[in-house]
Image (cartoon, rainbow, N blue to C red):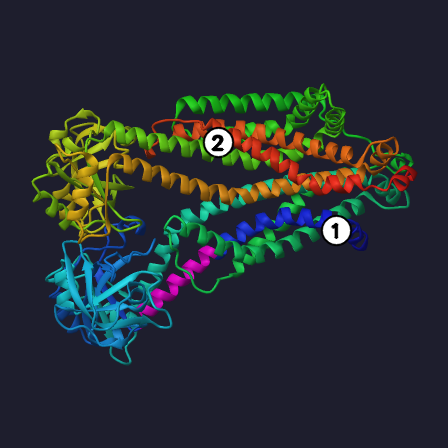
């Protein structure tokens, strides 16, 4: 049976390659996702292990809770510098030094910020005892000494066009300062810390410029020879005050890597969703392929049964074919996954996300997952066709032609339309109710399941409409689709899956763009909005001080954001100036009062207030990572937080008491009496020393936000195109198999006078009909799902639902065009059928 199965596979190499490609693309997504995430984790692991290589114990404040790295940057409360001497006095401690770190943005020789996308720009103190620096070494020059000297990582030196002895301008949280470059730092064989910019100073200078005089962020300790890290850690912990802990260097590296893995969890999950879509499409292609193969080989299987083959042998033979396809496809998909990981990284670079990388990490888990997914999906898709093959009776060997499967039975027909109706009603309910994202997913899947059942009916209905066309080529194509309606429907549904997701994303993106525009025009009262350029970490607070001193500026309101827990839930908290707040933005106060927003109080969005079950005058507990839980009284609730993406708003004074960072995420200001464009020009000139700050009118903010959405939509669509490619391969596969099955019919057509062109047109029109069915159902289902999804994301800022009809119509047209292209090779093959040989076949 194994030799028999291999012979059947190799009988049509084109069919084999197309089927394997369908599986390989989905496997490549799975493998690529794991390779990319594992490579990033490996890069961070190497970094943290290298940086802590010379440190046995690290002393620092304990976080009040396990904070999200992406919202807090891992910042903990600084400790008093006097604690360094206490740690140094612990028996077994050879070296103990305090260190600080914070925001530091290098300005290049042309006055532009050196700002890597996705990586931080930080400054730190340089250890006196170089053993504490681990992999960080001074390659050229020397360590900095005094207020005017600096060292910079080699990559930033190269990008900024600097050389030893040059003057370097650096923007900090509170000011811009100038230093002389005295050293260039490297990290082992690499030039930077995973693309980040690093500036180094001696400890007193770092404390001054980073705003940490008299405190340190952590104490790095090296033990004497002969003492274990754990023993030294325990000794140090016994002398530390409450709220301060000690960890071994290895544990710090491991914790840092785990935090990065957790932060990448959502990213990995999103990519795996794309992989799932591709695999689902591929499973339809495989199922359809094996169904057609079984139908074409009915006489062959019947003869096998007639000469003594058992049902089990037939079933095993078909499944063996599936296993071979799955194994080969998985191996190919694993190789493609490595390349895909690099491709996804380049796609993310387009939107300014520069992910760290190192040599590709191919873990055992990745290999196991790739082969498991590929083989399992292929076998599951082949089970029903294999079972159908095993039930073929020996008497089928007497038939001169394979029976044609015209479609669904009555029971399947009734069940299908019932399921489709239920799914459609659920989608309609989700579109009205809102905040039902999971029910939207369930409704979409239910509707698609209904389409699976009624697909043959829809194919026959489309064929019936086209059958009235005047041109005989269309009528013949329609009859062929109706005759093999299940096959046509399965091919179309593979395309439906991809287009459903693409259309849903398009509707959600369009809704988000319109919501941003509505938020700016509805809630904004400011004339100018200042933001960090690109993927910058923030704006120096000295910018707001500079603006307040100007006579042409009225209200200046700083906005800051930080991660915290609200009644135990992880949230982002926004801090604002209360003075002038009502002049720059309308929050849409629903209850309570904006005037009640004072120290110790908080504004809560109406949606979050409902979630927490609180109202104005009641209290919530805000837990900051650095300072722990703090009670806040609810000053009021608001509806229009989408412009500043706020759900919780506190005063700037409360923020500064609980968070070390002084970076502004935005600055809103009014310039009464000035034309917005003129005001933008004047403010931009005044901020020449801060080239990392962009000055925007409200219209600029709208354009930038919509451009970002378009970029994201482009990346998501590009990823989903792989699923569409799989569907197109399914169309090609189906047409190739159809041509093989109908070679005698095509030969008769040629014998009675049909030209090669007419045969090609018939095959192309079959492809167009299948593509049209898949495109229309996919776009319709995706649009409905997109509306429901947009309605459920109101808390995330989507307040307006928009359906981009032109874009959706373009998807349909493109899908039909792709159907024409998919039919090129099968149509050419059909037109070249040998007339005499085809007519002579029985």
Query: Alpha-carbon neighbours of circle 1 within 10 Å: few (<14), some, or many (≥20)?
Result: few
Place of residue 433 in the rendered image (x, y in percent of width and height, measured from the top left)? 40, 23
Of labels 1 and 2, the one closer to you: 2
Say whether residue 55 is visible.
no
Left/right placement of residue 616 relative to residue 778 reads left
Q: Helix, strand or loop at disc 1?
A: helix
Q: Observer-nearest residue: 728 or 178?
A: 178
Query: Alpha-carbon neighbours of circle 2 within 10 Å: few (<14), some, or many (≥20)?
Result: some
Most common secondary structure along the magenta stretch: helix
Which mark identifies residue 657?
none
- Which residue is depicted at the point 26% across and 56% down? 113
- Which residue is depicted at the point 52% across and 42% down? 720
- As displayed, is residue 625 above or below residue 556? below
Q: Which residue is mark 1?
A: 13
Dividing the image into 4 quarters, which one contains the C terminus? Answer: top right
- Which residue is depicted at the point 84% across and 32% down? 749
The single residue placed furthest to the bottom in the displayed view is 225
């Amino acid at each position: 049976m194994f030799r028999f199965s291999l012979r059947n596979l190799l009988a049509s190499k084109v069919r084999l390659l197309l089927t394997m490609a369908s599986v390989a693309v989905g496997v490549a997504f799975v493998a690529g996702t794991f390779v990319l995430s594992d490579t990033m984790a490996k890069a961070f692991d190497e970094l943290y292990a290298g940086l802590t290589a010379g440190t046995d114990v690290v002393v620092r404040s304990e976080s009040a809770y396990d904070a999200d790295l992406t919202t807090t940057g891992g910042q903990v409360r600084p400790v008093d510098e006097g604690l360094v001497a206490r740690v140094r006095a612990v028996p077994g401690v050879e070296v103990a030094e305090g260190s600080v770190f914070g925001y530091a943005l290098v300005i290049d020789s042309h006055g532009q910020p050196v700002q890597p996308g996705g990586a931080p720009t930080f400054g730190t103190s340089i250890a006196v005892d170089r053993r504490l620096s681990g992999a960080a070494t001074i390659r050229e020059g020397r360590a900095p000494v005094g207020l005017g000297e600096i060292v910079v990582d080699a990559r930033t030196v190269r990008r900024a066009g600097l050389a030893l002895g040059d003057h370097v301008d650096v923007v900090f949280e509170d000011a811009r300062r100038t230093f002389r470059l005295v050293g260039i730092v490297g990290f082992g064989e690499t030039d930077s810390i995973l693309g980040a910019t690093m500036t180094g100073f001696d400890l007193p200078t770092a404390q001054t410029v980073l705003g940490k005089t008299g405190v340190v962020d952590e104490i790095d300790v090296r033990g004497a020879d002969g003492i274990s890290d754990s023993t030294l850690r325990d000794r140090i912990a016994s002398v530390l005050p409450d709220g301060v802990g000690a960890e071994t260097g290895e544990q710090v590296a491991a914790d840092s890597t785990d935090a990065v893995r957790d932060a990448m969890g959502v990213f990995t999950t999103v990519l795996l969703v794309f992989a799932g879509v591709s695999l689902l499409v591929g499973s339809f292609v495989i199922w359809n392929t094996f169904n057609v193969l079984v139908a074409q080989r009915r006489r062959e299987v019947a003869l096998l049964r007639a000469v003594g083959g058992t049902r089990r042998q037939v079933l095993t033979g078909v499944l063996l074919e599936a296993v071979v396809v799955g194994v080969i496809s998985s191996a190919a998909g694993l190789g493609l996954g490595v390349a895909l990981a690099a491709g996804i990284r380049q796609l993310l670079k387009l939107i300014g996300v520069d992910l760290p990388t190192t040599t590709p990490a191919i873990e055992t888990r990745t290999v196991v997952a790739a082969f498991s997914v590929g083989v399992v999906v292929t076998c599951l898709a082949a089970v029903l066709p294999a079972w159908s093959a095993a039930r073929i009776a020996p008497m089928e060997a007497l038939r001169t032609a394979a029976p044609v499967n015209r479609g669904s039975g009555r029971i399947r027909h009734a069940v299908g339309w019932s399921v489709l109706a239920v799914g459609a009603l659920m989608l309609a309910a989700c579109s009205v109710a809102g905040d039902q994202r999971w029910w939207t997913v369930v409704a979409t899947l239910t509707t698609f399941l209904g389409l699976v059942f009624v697909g043959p009916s829809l194919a026959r209905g489309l064929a019936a409409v086209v059958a009235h066309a005047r041109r005989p080529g269309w009528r013949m194509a329609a009859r062929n689709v109706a005759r093999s309606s299940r096959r046509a429907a399965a091919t179309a549904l593979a395309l439906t899956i991809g287009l459903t997701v693409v259309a849903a994303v398009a509707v959600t993106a369009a809704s988000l763009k319109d919501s941003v525009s509505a938020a700016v025009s509805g809630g904004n009262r400011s004339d100018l909005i200042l933001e960090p350029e690109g993927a910058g970490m923030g704006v120096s607070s000295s910018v707001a001080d500079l603006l307040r001193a100007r006579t042409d500026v009225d209200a200046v309101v700083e906005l800051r954001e930080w991660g915290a827990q609200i009644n135990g839930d992880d949230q982002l908290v926004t801090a604002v100036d209360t003075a002038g707040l009502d002049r720059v933005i309308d929050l849409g106060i629903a209850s309570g009062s904006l005037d009640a927003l004072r120290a110790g109080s908080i504004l809560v969005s109406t949606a979050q207030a409902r979630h927490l079950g609180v109202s104005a005058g009641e209290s919530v507990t805000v837990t900051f990572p650095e300072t722990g839980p703090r009670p806040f009284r609810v000053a009021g609730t608001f509806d229009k937080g989408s412009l500043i993406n706020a759900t919780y708003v506190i005063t700037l004074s409360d923020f500064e008491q609980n968070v070390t960072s002084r970076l502004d995420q935005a600055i809103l200001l009014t310039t009464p009496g000035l034309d917005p464009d003129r005001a933008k020009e004047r403010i931009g000139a005044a901020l020449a020393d801060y080239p990392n700050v962009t000055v925007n009118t409200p219209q600029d903010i709208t354009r930038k936000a919509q451009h970002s959405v378009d970029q994201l939509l482009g990346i998501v669509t590009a990823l989903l195109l792989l699923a569409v490619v799989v569907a197109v391969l399914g169309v090609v596969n189906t047409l190739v198999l159809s041509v093989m099955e109908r070679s005698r019919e095509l030969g008769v057509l040629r014998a009675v006078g049909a030209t090669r062109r007419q045969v090609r047109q018939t095959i192309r029109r079959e492809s167009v009909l299948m593509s049209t069915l898949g495109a229309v159902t996919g776009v319709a289902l995706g649009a409905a799902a997109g509306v429901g999804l947009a309605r459920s994301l109101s808390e995330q800022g989507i307040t307006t639902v928009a359906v981009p009809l032109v874009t959706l119509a373009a998807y349909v047209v493109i899908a039909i065009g792709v159907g024409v292209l998919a039919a090129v090779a099968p149509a050419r093959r059909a037109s070249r059928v040998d007339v005499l040989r085809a007519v002579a076949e029985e």
